[in-house]
């Protein structure tokens, strides 16, 4: 289900939370919203799920105007806020049972079991929530959102406060949802590598304004069309070094050879190194990351706001 955000403005007193961002979230995509603290991510999500209204502009979910939709938007959008809690004395299964009854879901027992399995909590379903780790509690929150099978999931900082194992488990869960359902998933995060791993497209916000938006691969290429090829010679290092000459800028780190070249030249370079594979212990190709695009977008804002001398 497609989400369309058009020239949205929101102010709280003297604070401008959103200053006219416009972009689309394609149906069925996993979409990332990036920004520093105060960029407007949480405000945008509050508007998207109908918890607040914009001062101007329009947000549509599947063609439905969120501002006038009322409860209908909550039938389409499942929202997991950054901070959510459950009664500690209740079990995970009991928590989901309450949520299912509130939503008037039929076949609740089977649906609860399905969601518990999806988020990996079947074995802990009948334990008190007070004994859950942070990661388990976040997965229970996601299970409560998934109960009604909403076509849109909005996840605000879903891995905040999780340890590395919890983050990895949550990533696998989001990837499974993307792989096995048609849901449109919108995720905010401060962690660039997380968005780069999970998302097809991103929007970058700063001070309530949209600084960049588009497919992750396109944003990375827009920053730099160079790639870095790293190889580790194990024998006849001089021969390998001679073979890569002329294919780009070569740096000998002592352990590896790093060759920076144009993307179109990387194929010839890899083919050349393939002929040297008996002398190599490893070969990697690194493309520009989303981090470079993010920092360029923020730098562009600084340039835009500079006052000429």
Image (cartoon, rainbow, N blue to C red):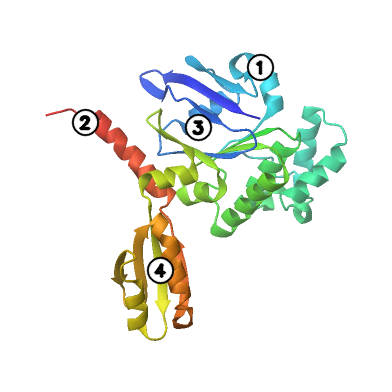
**Which residue sits at x=44%, y=25%?**
21
Q: Which marked residue is nearer to the observer: mark 3 or mark 2?
A: 2
Q: Secondary structure at mark 4?
A: strand
Q: Residue furthest bottom?
A: 235
**Rendered-image quadrant of the C terminus:** top left
Q: Nearer the viewer, residue 19 or 119?
A: 19
Q: Which residue is mark 2?
A: 306
Instruction: Pick whichever of labels 4 and 3 is earlier in the sequence.
Output: 3
Looking at the image, is mark 4 or mark 1 nearer the viewer? Answer: 4
* Circle 2 SS class: loop
Say which element carries label 1.
Answer: loop
Residue beneath disc 4: 230
State which mark lies toward you, 2 or 1: 2
Across and down, in percent, residue 189 comes to 49, 43
Q: Mark 3 to mark 2: distance in Å?
A: 27 Å
Q: Is residue 73 visible to the viewer in this orientation of the structure?
A: yes
Q: Position of residue 215 (x, y in %)?
A: 50, 40
If you read the primary sequence from the N terminus, does the residue marked by circle 4 or circle 2 appear first?
4
The nearer-to-camera label among 4 and 2 is 4
- What is the C-alpha distance between the residues marked 4 and 1? 55 Å
- Which residue is tagged 1? 70
Whichever of labels 3 and 2 marks the residue nearer the N terminus, that label is: 3
Q: Residue beneath label 3, please?
A: 42
Mark 4 residue crowding within 10 angstroms, few (<14) / some (14–19) / many (20+): many
- Is 185 on the left-hand or right-hand side of 224? right
Res 91 seen here? no
């Amino acid at each position: 289900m497609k989400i369309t955000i058009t020239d949205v403005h929101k102010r709280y007193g003297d604070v401008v939370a959103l200053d006219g961002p416009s972009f689309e979230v394609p149906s069925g995509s996993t979409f990332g919203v990036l920004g520093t603290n105060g960029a407007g991510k949480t405000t945008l999500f509050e508007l998207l799920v109908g918890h607040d209204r914009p001062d101007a502009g329009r947000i549509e979910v599947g063609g439905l105007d969120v501002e006038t939709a009322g409860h209908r938007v909550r039938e389409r959008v499942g929202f997991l806020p950054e901070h959510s809690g459950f009664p500690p004395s209740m079990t995970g299964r009991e928590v989901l049972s309450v949520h299912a009854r509130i939503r008037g879901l039929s076949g609740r027992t089977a649906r609860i079991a399905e969601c518990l399995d999806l988020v990996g909590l079947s074995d802990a379903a009948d334990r008190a929530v007070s004994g859950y780790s942070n990661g388990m509690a976040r997965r229970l929150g996601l299970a409560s959102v998934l109960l009604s099978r909403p076509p849109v999931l909005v996840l605000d900082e879903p891995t905040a406060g999780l340890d590395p194992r919890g983050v990895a488990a949550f990533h696998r869960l989001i990837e499974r949802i993307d792989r096995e359902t048609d849901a449109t998933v919108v995720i905010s995060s401060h962690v660039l590598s997380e968005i780069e791993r999970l998302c097809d497209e991103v929007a970058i916000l700063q001070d309530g304004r949209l600084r960049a938006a588009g497919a992750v691969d396109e944003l990375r290429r827009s920053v730099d069309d160079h790639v870095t090829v790293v190889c580790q010679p194990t024998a006849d290092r001089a021969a390998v070094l001679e073979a890569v000459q002329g294919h780009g800028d070569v740096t000998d780190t002592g352990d590896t050879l790093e060759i920076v070249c144009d993307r179109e030249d990387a194929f010839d370079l890899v083919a050349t190194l393939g002929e040297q594979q008996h002398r190599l212990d490893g070969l990697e190709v690194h493309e520009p990351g989303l981090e470079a695009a993010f920092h360029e977008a923020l730098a562009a804002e600084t340039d835009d706001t500079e006052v000429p001398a």
